[in-house]
Image: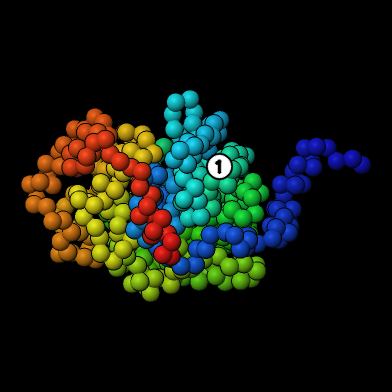
Amino acid sequence: MSTSPRAKQDLEDSPAKRLKLDTEMPPPSDPRMPVFDRGLYLAPMVRIGSLPSRLLALEYGADLVWTPEIVDRAIMGTTRRVNASTGLVEFMKGDKQIFSCHPIERPYLIYQVGSSTPENAAEAVRIVTAHDDVAGVDLNCGCPKPFSTLGGMGANLLTEPDLLCDILRQMRRAAPPHVSVTCKIRLLPTQAETLALVEQIVRTRTIRALTIHCRTKPMRPREPALVDRFREIAAHVAKVAAETGQDVPVIYNGDCFGAGDAPRLRERTGASAVMMARAAELNPSCFRPRRACVATVIAPRWMHYAIHFDNPFGNTKYCVTQLAFSTMAGARESEGERVSPLPKRELIRIRTELSQARTHEDMARTLGLPWPLDTSEALALLRQALDQR
Ligand SMILES: Cc1cc2nc3c(=O)[nH]c(=O)nc-3n(C[C@H](O)[C@H](O)[C@H](O)COP(=O)(O)O)c2cc1C
């Protein structure tokens, strides 16, 4: 009796077949993959995690940097182009830059995919890895914002674990062997549900690391992260990983406000590594124990990168005006630490003028930079910082 194509497909999709595929799949352990078992990482942040922010985070000590979530359909249909003089790589749709990156960040760069369709996620991975532009690809399973969840993406995947795991399998198959696949989740309402979810994910034998943002989907950023739920989840991941012949580091995320916070959080949670978002949005030098002044150091450095790589102006203005132009570090770990030599009224003037700027030139002049700005040495400090690693 011959099997119909539909019946054959059903057989291939059956849980038994899938389980077999998972155990047949070699665990992802290519030595060329990035290392996730230590360090302090820049979290994925829509708009904020553009090229200049990532380069600054690396310059100031971030061990790995995530791109913002880029929805699969956004990168599909793009054309890749390389700027021969700066090395900038851009993925373009018409005149619109969908994603940009630079070879200097390649070993540290994790590209985050937004998806609810295994085929599209795989296509996004193929596009972004075709020229070896990134070290890893990550699936966003944590974003609670409507633009992500309405399409069934982001945090909605947490309650569709079979689909989530299918997406990871397709991403793993689409990625070259030396490119890692990882996944970023939030907590489910109960610990038991969360343990079951991470177990199912780890059993796919597709991921090189798992990031857990210790908030549930309805929790707002101002609500304290549920730090103490992490340790048991990380222990469960380690147990399932060991049973299935893998090593899956678990990255802690939620309310780490600076390099000084990280050892305490690692100790409290047992995490392999720690990821920071809002602290880096305010000041990307938060990866160092002592923050640099936004007005006199960080914003000018941001402008050097932005102008050198002709960053889209709307993005530059958004990111630079989100920086913390403050006299104090303003973060919990270093309350009382003065970071700016400028008086408060000068910081207010700069912030006001930046919010009214219409060009990169306006912004550079507001920050006291010469115009035209010589950016020929834009990458020198970053090269130096990376050489010292
Ligand atoms: C401006 C902004 C944009 C974000 N965009 C993303 C995103 O694209 N993908 C994602 O997985 N999480 C995103 N997040 C969530 C962060 O990655 C992180 O999980 C969350 O902010 C908790 O970390 P924190 O306490 O260090 O801020 C975003 C957060 C912020 C503040």
Identify which residue is drawn at 11% across, 52% down. 342
Identify which residue is drawn at 26% across, 35% down. 372
Q: Amino acid at mark 1?
A: Val
Q: Quadrant of the C terminus?
A: bottom left
| Residue matched to label 1 | 128
Residue farthest along the bottom direction in this orientation: 267
* Residue 212 % position (x, y): 44, 59
Identify which residue is drawn at 46% across, 50% down. 104
* Residue 266 % position (x, y): 39, 70
Viewer-proximal residue, 90 or 365? Answer: 365
Viewer-proximal residue, 127 or 131? Answer: 131
Instruction: Work out whether 246 lies above or below 354.
Output: below
Q: In this figure, which colouring scheme has been used for the structure?
A: rainbow
Question: From this viewpoint, is residue 141 visible?
Answer: no
Identify which residue is drawn at 36% across, 63% down. 226
* Residue 118 % position (x, y): 60, 42
Picture quarter containing residue 322?
Answer: top left
Helix, strand or loop at mark 1: helix
User: Callout 1: few (<14), some (14-19), or many (20+) C-alpha neighbours within 10 Å?
Assistant: many
| Label 1 C-beta lies within 8 Å of the nearest ligand 1 atom | no
Instruction: Work out whether 62 lies above or below 37.
Output: above
Instruction: State left or right for residue 190 relative to residue 26.
Output: left
Instruction: Report the number of discs.
Output: 1
Instruction: State left or right for residue 118 relative to residue 381.
Output: right
Picture quarter containing residue 117?
Answer: top right
Instruction: State left or right for residue 196 relative to residue 223.
Output: right
* Residue 36 % position (x, y): 50, 63
Picture quarter containing residue 252?
Answer: bottom left
Viewer-proximal residue, 66 or 228? Answer: 66
